[in-house]
Image (cartoon, rainbow, N blue to C red):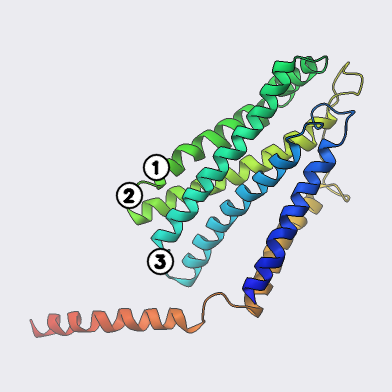
Amino acid sequence: VIGWLALIGIPAACILHGYVGFLFGAVKANPWWSTALMPVVFLISAVVSGIAALILLYVFICWRRGVNCDADCIKSMARYLWISLTVAVTLELLEVIHMAYEGGAEWHIIQVLLTEKLKFSYIQLQLLIGSLIPFLLLLLAMSPRLYDGFRTFLSSVAALLVLVQVFAMRWNVVIGGQLFSRSFRGFTEYHPSLYGPEGLIAAVCVMIAPFVVLYIACQLLPVWPKNEVAATTDSDDASAAPNSDAAVAV
């Protein structure tokens, strides 16, 4: 059943994120959105965020169940995340470099947008904290001589920062494209509200909803057998019993 769900869900997710990027790229009146790379950037960033979320969920579930994370699994996901992150950041930078190289009439407003209005969310959050630091952490996590627990820690921190990077990228694209006027003569300010369909409460509910659906799905289609933890505990007790008997004999 899980295989069939993956067969349906993966193409659907690719179509969804590619279509969202296509909608932004088709807005010709907005130079920050109207690029040929926009659908590809959205699709690759969705892959990046999916792998990062999978790492965090796997580590959290293993911790909650009281079992150790599989070292090979963590190492493989860290490698895939590093590759996807490299491709995503490269495409994002190519998009901006291409705009700067063309040097059109709209570049002066985009330059001010990136260096002033979105300075924190783009340069510091998206590029430095969310891209450069996870890139280095994942390189270290892929080292074969690294302790398994430390590798899991590095991969988890990198995955969390990558999720911050993807959120910052979405913010810079969606909000940043609405901060300057169509005539390129000035900027406006955006202050998110607390209530309403576009408020912070609604955004938090939308972010929590997938985890609720995932929890219900795991109850209906359990990924791990329920007796696996009990079997692991029994085997640990059985292996510890001879040691305790030997201690009593001494």
Residue 111, quarter of the rendered image = top right
Q: Secondary structure at mark 2?
A: loop
Mark 2 in CB contact with mark 1 (< 8 angstroms): yes
The quadrant the C terminus occupies is bottom left
19, above or below 104, in the image: below
Which is more N-terminal, label 1 or label 3? 3
Q: How many numbered tags mark residues here?
A: 3
- Residue lying at the far right in this picture: please name it: 183
39, above or below 181, in the image: below
**Number of residues whose C-alpha sits closer than 10 Å to that of mark 3, classed few (under 14), some (14–19) or many (20 or more):** few
**Number of residues whose C-alpha sits closer than 10 Å to that of mark 1, classed few (under 14), some (14–19) or many (20 or more):** some
Q: Secondary structure at mark 1?
A: helix
Which is more N-terminal, label 1 or label 2? 1
Which is more N-terminal, label 3 or label 2? 3
The residue lying at 55 percent from left, 38 percent from top is: 86
Q: Which residue is mark 2?
A: 146
Q: Position of residue 232 (x, y in %)?
A: 38, 79
Is 82 in front, or is 222?
Answer: 82
Mark 3 is on which residue type?
Asn
The residue lying at 32 percent from left, 53 percent from top is: 147
Mark 2 is on which residue type?
Leu
**Number of residues whose C-alpha sits closer than 10 Å to that of mark 2, classed few (under 14), some (14–19) or many (20 or more):** few
In the rendered structure, find residue 140 and report the number of the disc placed on it.
Answer: 1
Mark 1 is on which residue type?
Leu
The residue lying at 49 percent from left, 60 percent from top is: 59
Q: Does any portion of residue 129 appear in the rendered image?
A: yes
Q: Which residue is mark 3?
A: 68
